[in-house]
Image: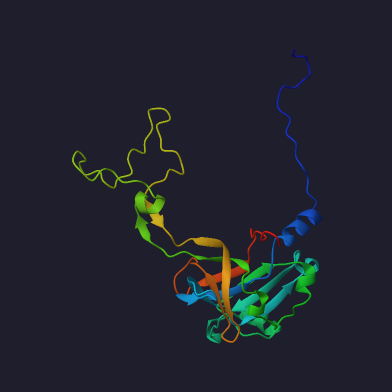
């Protein structure tokens, strides 16, 4: 029974997370990784004689350019440089930033948020090598997918095509009706239609490291990774890796 002064609206509960809690929880889920270049795909033989497809990643010369701390920057992170860049192509602010660390200019700078004790083990100018990972470890590889240009709904969203036989008049690869009735009289935002496909940041999770070439600083991961040959990739420990049964 309704009473005066009593609200019938649902009560919404909110939880306040302190900065210390949010910061510590965020750092626990982040790990140091490597910046690399996709060399291409090939096949290798395992010890059991199985032939598996692998992607070769060049992760050479990951140079630490800066160690960020909570006191100076508000968070803890390690910034690394990868690749090479001519001095004439480096801006003066960036040149001063790299000169402070005593490292060569790279094609790309990447930050990895890690725990403070892990960051304390590194220093500007040090090199992060392939020994960061081990064979059999699960990793996530992020890159920019290959651009496919303007694509239809069949290629873009895996739509089914129309009948290719008698009775279908020029409606083989069309998506069908996209409209509504007079109400609402519009096409809802997010409707799956034709458009640009690819050329977006994508991450392939839980790829297994099949082999590591420490001499040539190469990592061979089982399966395919996003991007074309020569594309930049970020390799980090898998965030959804499952522990082996019985381990």
Q: Where is the N terminus found, in terms of image quarters?
A: top right
- Left/right placement of residue 18 relative to residue 136 reads right
* Residue at the spot 65% in from the left edge and 69% down from the top edge: 111
Q: Find residue 19 and report its image quarter.
A: bottom right
Q: Nearer the viewer, residue 44 or 111?
A: 44
State the image coordinates of residue 145 (x, y, percent, origin top left). 46, 64
Q: Residue at x 68, y 86 (%)?
A: 102
Residue 157 at x, y = what percent?
A: 41, 50
Q: Nearer the viewer, residue 58 or 166?
A: 166
Q: Quarter of the image containing the C terminus?
A: bottom right
Q: How many marks?
A: 0
Locate residue 175 relative to residue 244 in the image: left or right: left
- 107 relative to 190, above or below: below
The residue at the point 69 percent across, 63 percent down is: 30
Query: Can residue 39 be seen from the camera position used here?
Result: no
Residue at coordinates 77% horizontally, 14% vertically from top-left? Answer: 3
The foreground one among 97 and 139 is 139
Task: Identify whether 99 is placed above or below 194.
Answer: below
Farthest top residue in view: 1
Residue 11 in view here:
yes
**Compared with residue 160, is residue 20 higher up or lower down, i.e. above or below?**
below
Figure colour scheme: rainbow
* Image spot of residue 76 (x, y percent): 75, 67
Residue 118 in the image: state x and y as whole percent.
76, 71
Relative to 148, 50 lies left or right: right
For this orientation, the residue located farthest to the front is 48
């Amino acid at each position: 029974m309704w009473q005066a002064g009593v609200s019938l609206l649902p009560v919404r509960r909110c939880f306040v997370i302190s900065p210390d809690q949010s910061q510590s929880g965020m750092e626990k889920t982040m790990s140091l990784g490597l910046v690399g270049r996709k060399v291409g795909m090939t096949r290798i033989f395992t010890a059991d004689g199985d032939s598996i497809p692998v992607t070769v990643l060049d992760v050479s010369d990951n140079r630490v350019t800066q160690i960020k701390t909570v006191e100076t920057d508000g968070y803890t992170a390690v910034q690394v440089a990868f690749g090479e860049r001519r001095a004439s192509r480096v801006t003066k602010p960036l040149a001063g930033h790299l000169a402070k660390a005593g490292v060569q200019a790279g094609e790309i700078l990447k930050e990895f948020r890690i725990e403070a004790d892990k960051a304390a083990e590194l220093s500007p100018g040090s090199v992060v090598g392939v020994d960061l990972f081990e064979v059999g470890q699960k990793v996530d590889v992020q890159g920019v997918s290959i651009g496919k240009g303007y694509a239809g709904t069949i290629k873009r969203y895996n739509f089914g095509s129309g009948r290719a036989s008698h009775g279908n008049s020029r409606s083989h690869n069309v998506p069908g009706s996209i409209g509504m009735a007079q109400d609402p009289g519009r096409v809802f935002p997010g409707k799956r239609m034709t458009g640009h496909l690819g050329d977006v940041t994508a991450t392939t999770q839980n790829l297994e490291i099949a082999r590591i070439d420490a001499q040539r600083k190469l990592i061979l991961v089982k399966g395919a990774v996003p991007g074309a040959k020569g594309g930049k990739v970020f390799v980090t420990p898998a965030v959804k890796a499952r522990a082996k049964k019985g381990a």
